[in-house]
Amino acid sequence: MAQGRERKAGAVPGATRHVAITGASSGLGRALAELYAAQGCRLSLAGRDPGRLAAVAAACRARGAEVDACTVDVVDPAAMHDWLVARDADCGIDILIANAGMGGSAVLPPPHGEDGALARRILSVNTAGMINSVTPLLSRMVSRAAGHIVLVGSISGAIGLPQSPVYCASKAAVQIYGDALRRLVREHGVRVTNVLPGFIDTPMSRSLGMARPWCWTADRAARRIARDVARGRPRCIFPWQLRWLIALQSLLPLWLSDAVLSAASRRARRRAEAGRI
């Protein structure tokens, strides 16, 4: 009987992989869903917009994938737990991609900074929501010594940009959480990959109304993430230009980093304001 449960949990070599993706109703989440659908994976998709989520599910089914789509908000821990445990009990989830997040113009505060309500909302979605996506499956993956957790953060979490302090903090927390989690579960056969992307051409990033250097298409970003996940990479950072800028920034004196980033933020704000006139 135990052997049968293990087979149902996806432990059979060569079995169709089961991939769960949050934030799957648009942007990078949609691109990842369609990519894994084309690879013949079974999909469990979550998002907040039922109409867009249904469209993504239909597109994935057209590619031959078996799809279960659920309208659920990552800030609701009970709903996330019930959905993920049910999907894992039906067929063990091999890859969890915690992709849901809040960004774009919605996280840009005025010069005096975020008010309390906005700050709490950003942290609730980007940090607590990420943890709500992981904890329901963590013990189940550890118990069967298999599984891969993918945390989609942001390269902003490695810098601390002046135009979005709380957003950067929320993504920095995700990065540290992922690093610590990887070190905790690696001896139990569970892998963790931190994804730190730069700009991706999605509706969310387009809302910024500013220059987006080295911006990748969502399809290109999805291919890079899937490749690094398949290779078991602990981190997936792109594009390379921003990766090197982060490394350079860490070598600069703090006063110089502050001056450079503050000046860049002022220029970006002026360009955005000019574009709105």
Image (cartoon, grey):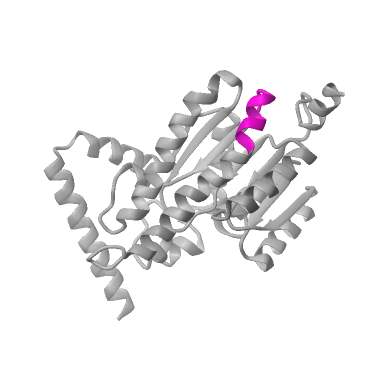
In magenta segment, residue 141 = yes
In magenta segment, residue 142 = yes
- Residue lying furthest top: 187
- Residue lying furthest bottom: 277
Q: Is residue 102 visible?
A: yes
Q: How many marks?
A: 0
The N terminus lies in which quarter of the figure? Answer: top right
Could you tell whether 204 is left or right of 161 in the image?
right
Q: Main secondary structure of the magenta part?
A: helix
**In front: 3, or 171?**
3
- Residue lying furthest front: 78
Q: Position of residue 103 (x, y in %)?
A: 43, 59
| Residue at 27%, 68% in the rendered image | 110
Could you tell whether 191 is left or right of 243 in the image?
right
Q: Which residues are magenta?
A: 137-146
Q: Is residue 238 visible?
A: no
Could you tell whether 20 is left or right of 193 in the image?
right
| Residue at 68%, 34% in the rendered image | 94
Q: Position of residue 127 (x, y in %)?
A: 45, 48
The C terminus lies in which quarter of the figure? Answer: bottom left
Q: Position of residue 88 (x, y in %)?
A: 73, 39
Q: Position of residue 273 (x, y in %)?
A: 28, 73
| Residue at 77%, 35% in the rendered image | 16
| Residue at 51%, 46% in the rendered image | 130
Q: Residue 255: which quarter of the image?
A: top left
Relative to residue 27, is residue 240 depicted above or below? Answer: above
Relative to residue 270, is residue 2 depicted above or below? Answer: above
